[in-house]
Image (cartoon, grey):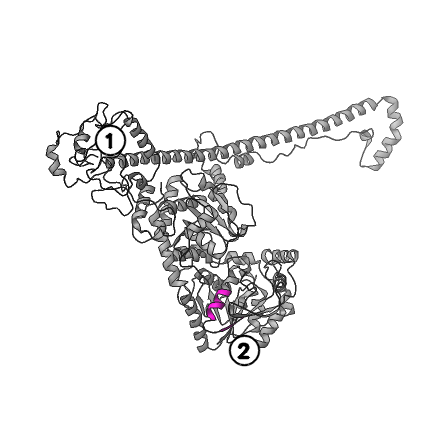
Amino acid sequence: MKLAVVVQRYGQAINGGAELHARYVAEHLARHVDVEVLTTCATDYVTWRNELAPGVETINGVPVRRFTVKHERDPLVFGRRSDRVFEQRHSLGDELDWLDAEGPASPALIDYLSKHATGFDYCLFFSYRYYHAYYGVRAAAGRAILVPTAERDATVGLSIFQPVFRSVRALMYNSPEERAMINAVSGNQDVPGVVVGVGSHVPANPQPNRFRQKHNVRGPFAIYVGRIDQNKGCPELFDFFQGYLADPAARLSLVLIGNTLLEIPTHPRIRHLGFLDDAEKFDAMAGAEVLIMPSYFESLSMVALEAWALGRPVLANGRCDVLKGQCLRSNAGLYYETFGEFSATLRAIEQNRWLAGSLGRNGRQFYREHYDWPVIERKYLDMFARLGNEPPARTTDPLPGWFDRRRQDLLAAEDVLAALPGGRAHGPLKGSTMVASTRTAGTRA
Amino acid sequence: MPDFNVRSDSVNVEQIMDQIRARIREKRGVDYTEQQIHELAAVKLEKFLDPRGVRSDLLDQFRKAQPAYEPPKLPNFAFEDATLFESHRAPIRWIRTLLMPLLKLLFNPNPLIQALHIQSRLNTMNAEREARRESSRRAMDQLYYELVHNLVIETTRTGIEVKNLKMRVESLASRLEFNERRARALESAVVYRPSNEEPAERPSSPEPASRPRPSQPPPRQGQPAPRPSQPVYNAPSSPGAAGPSIPSATPGTATDVSQTPSPGGGPAGEGPGQRSRRRRRRRGRRGGASAAAIMGAPAGAPSGGLLHAPAPADDGGPDGADDGSNVAEHHEAEADEAPSTRVEPTPPVEPAPPVEHAPPEDSTKPDSDPQ
């Protein structure tokens, strides 16, 4: 069996969520099938500038074929088009213009797929929201499997992606919440799908004392790992944690790991250590009392899974359906929506060792049962086997015509998103037959 | 103070969150956002304030009570020199114009015209001034009402803050009380196992059945905490093992020594200044060291007849989550601040001398070696 993994960026130094997800999956599936990665020459997700050479190289034993990006992203144009499609009534043409402005527009990659798709049994597309997925799914019709990595943001409300969700052979979801959301927005309940997620390379014996000595970290601490950004809910985390520190009984410090786009509050018990390599990151997580995930938008929190793999509890933002659902399903994390809840849950984990230990043990068990690599690999291989026994049931919808593209009859994507049902999706994590009890939201005005 | 209690073996996050939220509701009523504070200020002031004399929806009531100001339309018109002779009928106007010289021959209408003209201008000026004054007064009224409204909001906020601070004070008081109880319990929880030779030695004791008098502090209180390697104290076999506080203790006579009060009220053989040193040590011991550090008991020390002190706290190591329920229960007990701490039994404290705590009657074995 030959498998193409198509993703917007790829490389060892690229640590974005979906890209890392794609690399992990490619490397693990390469043990079972022939895998070739098709990607672009870009490494920066903001500009999509061509920084790597086109052609074929091998990364960790996986051949990677790179294609140039036609144009870089113009942030002004992209911002204007985003405002148009997310906030106003618009047309399909506006959405296609937005997709082109978003990038990474790589017609060479799509041409290659059109010509060579028959050479692959399946093409695994990561991240539905980019150019390569929208056009690549059409180019590899009948062979496309989508790993949407969809978050609950306005992009999912764009009409151009609904045919994509409906026309692929299968979808590999990250969480039941993601699945319920995509089912609701596109009505693709009959498309085979399974909640898979992704594993991680967690070391067996992390050394928290090494981390403490190197960075002079003393006492118990909570940890945040990831980009320190407004979109990740970090300002709220800072506010809440400073409020928590106002309590004289509070013992925890906050350790921040990751590159920052924000100003870190100056407080002796809030420490920013910058970007750390994986070994140090896992050492730090192993030494933490709790991992805090303040993000509002996640399709799957790999950091939370890593914390659970290390037996650490998680405190997540309860307004993120996915994180809340993960905490509830795993029984391995608490969640908050207000400062009162943040403070109370953090103190509960800090002061009640039995609770923290039980949450951590549940998390480790949850990780082993659902996100360990043998489990992940088996789900992919089972899906390939299942699709091998079923003929493709759907054909891809044709691209809209000239008049269809210009009809201003599409609702603002944010309105579409607001109409989608939210909350935790109830259903099993395993299996592919779960149908979310949600309704389909039409996007035509 | 923890926000909930988890006693079962399996964790149910949903249940825990319900407990936490219930606890928060119990503490605060609700968790207020800025918008909620405004709503409360507008609607439910009686929850926080004495609403007597204060309208809950001040601005709305004010706006309802006072519709927008419209100046009254007073009759006034400009009076010019030709006004007296104007007519909408052209022939009459022509005749009046024609006869104007004759009229002016009979009397002079100009002063009348001027007076009326001035009066018209005065009327206009007065109306404008009145409109400005009314407008200004209404703007001031708006400001006053805004001010009152803001005062109500701030008072509401202050009330909530006061409530929170009161609860915090209560929480701190309970923590303090718990810590004091724990300190007393830890001081009195040292239990000694009698040595094997003790029954044979007991008859040789000069006062085998006597109990230390309340005014006579037991020597056990004055002894340094046993070292971790010696959680069970047997009769010292060498003077060095007796510790510095009893330099004159001889092997096999520890019981005698302990029950022989020193002239100063301390143990026999205590030198001058020993008592004050003991006090200093005890104060230092109360200063926050962990139970294990105070008692010198290793985490795995057997508990029968030994310290019932809680296990030492894990300081956040990687195995903290898996280090068993003993540590967790200890922390839970700490966190709960409940009287049911793991330091058991918590004995009643006898009337203490001015400085030192008297030993609990039932916490130490009366026939044990007091050292």
Residue picked out by circle 2: A119
Q: Quadrant of the N terminus of chain B?
A: top left
Quadrant of the image occupied by residue A56: bottom right
Quadrant of the image occupied by residue B82: top right
- On the question of residue A362 being in view, the answer is yes
Residue located 34% across and 42% down the image: B335
Task: Using the image as rendered, state which of residue A254 and residue A144 is in the foreground.
Answer: A254
- The magenta segment is A23-36
Residue B56 place in picture, x, y as percent: 48, 35
Residue A149 sits above or below residue B228 on the image: below
Task: Using the image as rendered, state which of residue A77 and residue B59 is in the foreground.
Answer: A77
Task: Using the image as rendered, state which of residue A248 and residue B28 is in the foreground.
Answer: A248
Residue B43 place in picture, x, y as percent: 47, 38
- Whether residue B38 appears in magenta in the rendering, the answer is no
Residue A203 place in picture, x, y as percent: 42, 59
Q: State left or right for residue B15 relative to residue A408.
A: left
Secondary element under disc 1, as helix, strand or loop, is loop
Secondary element under disc 2, as helix, strand or loop, is helix
Mark 2 belongs to chain? A
Say which mark, if any, is on residue B247. 1
Crowd band around label 1 with a 10 angstrom C-alpha radius: few (<14), some (14–19), many (20+): some
Amino acid on which disc 2 is placed = Gly
Crowd band around label 2 with a 10 angstrom C-alpha radius: few (<14), some (14–19), many (20+): few
Q: CA distance from mark 1 to mark 2?
A: 92 Å
